[in-house]
Image (cartoon, grey):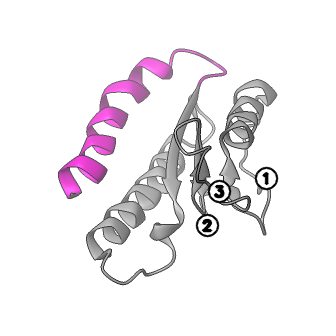
Amino acid sequence: VLDEMLTSHFAFARAVIPMLSTRPNSLYLSIGGGAAFAPMANAGLISVAAAGQAMLTRILARERGPTPPRIFELVINGLVNTRHSRGFANPGWIRDDDVGRVVTELILDGATTWRAVRGDGPLIVMDEGG
């Protein structure tokens, strides 16, 4: 689990961030889940890997400072209603187009500091302070 869910993020960041550093408005976006912040029974390894991914993103942002790329973490705090789950998804699930809209806003707005997109909702853009 740790190799698939954490080590792969570290290896990818190490390979990609140097390439993005030459592009002034580039974005490195890590997408994680609420398991990083809320302990779940029978999901210990998933929570540990998710928490590690969240911290990795914060460390990358702190180390890069104001130099490219911009580094953000999008936390999806709930189940996502996708084309594969339309037939059985609960109406309260996060819609995939909402996720897409937040990602698009991050790409297009050129923000250099993170901010809460919906601080009390299911989609949260985290800053290095959490």
Q: How many marks?
A: 3
Mark pair 1, 2: CA separation: 13 Å
Res 16 → quadrant:
top left
Residue numbers of the magenta segment: 2-26
Q: Residue at x 60, y 46 (%)?
A: 87
Q: Would you say 2 lies left or right of 50 here? A: left
Nearer-the-camera pick, 88 or 60 = 88
- Classify mark 2: helix, strand or loop: loop
Residue type, label 3? Asp
Residue at image mark 2 = 130
Nearer-the-camera pick, 50 or 58 = 50
Mark 1 vs 2: CB contact within 8 A:
no
Mark pair 2, 3: CA separation: 5 Å
Of circles 3 and 1, which is in front? 1
Residue at image mark 1 = 117
Residue type, label 1? Val
Compared to residue 24, the image places residue 76 above or below, namely below
76 within the magenta span = no
Q: Earlier in the sequence, mark 3 or mark 1?
A: 1
Q: Would you say 117 lies left or right of 41 here? A: right
